[in-house]
Amino acid sequence: MANNNPNKVRSSEDEIKDRLVAINRVTKVTKGGRHFSFAAIVVVGNEDGLVGHGLGKANEVPEAIIKAIDEGKKNLVKIPLLNGTIPHEQEVKYGGAQVFIKPASSGTGVIAGGAMRAVLESVGVKNVLAKSKGSSNPHNVVKATILALTELRDPITIAQARGIKLDRVFNG
């Protein structure tokens, strides 16, 4: 018997959305000819502070994307957000890619390019300034952006760790 209750709480699996960052065609030349396979990079998130990334490889594009989505759902991380933006600026280097993210005022939008934009939109950041320096390899840019987001600290957590009131964190 199916449960058709309209007030049923949806599981987190239903809310997670995926964004395709890049597809790479890989060619292996053998004695019998060329063999093509595909690698897909996907960013998944619920647009409310949860994000993950995955890489899927297969002989067909849709199959590679499905594998990447499944891998992305396995390594989700929680990101602290503050009024639709990030709590503070952050700069991180991963491999050859270096990313810089900075909070922006309301109405600014997501000022970021390519792979960084996919990650930031999947997290649910509405206003942010971002710059990618160094390598533009989507693998490393995605990993650097997620690393930068995981290193962000929530003002409430900082106040508790220091043993001070929340308004002292903002006012010094």
Image (spheres, helix red, strand yellow):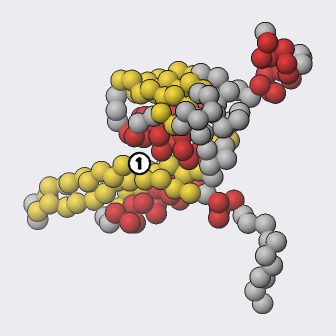
Q: Residue at x 85, y 19 (%)?
A: 167
Q: Quadrant of the C terminus?
A: top right
| Residue 124 placement (x, y as % from top left) | 61, 44
Give 171 or 45, whichever is nearer the viewer: 171
Give 28 or 40, whichever is nearer the viewer: 40
The image quarter containing residue 153 is top right
| Residue at the far front in the pictured view | 107
Q: Is residue 94 left or right of residue 120?
A: left
Asked whether residue 137 appears in the rendered view, the answer is yes
| Residue at the far top in the pictured view | 172
Label 1: element kind: strand
Indicate whether 124 appears above or below 1.
above
Q: Amino acid at mark 1?
A: Val
| Residue at the far bottom in the pictured view | 1
- Within 10 Å of disc 1 (Cα), the crowding (few <14, some 14-19, many 20+) is some
Q: Is residue 114 left or right of residue 15?
A: left
Asked whether residue 151 appears in the rendered view, the answer is no
Indicate whether 161 appears above or below 45.
above
| Residue 65 placement (x, y as % from top left) | 42, 60
Q: Residue at x 42, y 40 (%)?
A: 115
Q: Which residue is mark 1?
A: 21
Indicate whether 5 appears above or below 121.
below
Indicate whether 130 appears above or below 109.
above
Q: Residue at x 77, y 17 (%)?
A: 170
Q: Residue at x 79, y 22 (%)?
A: 158
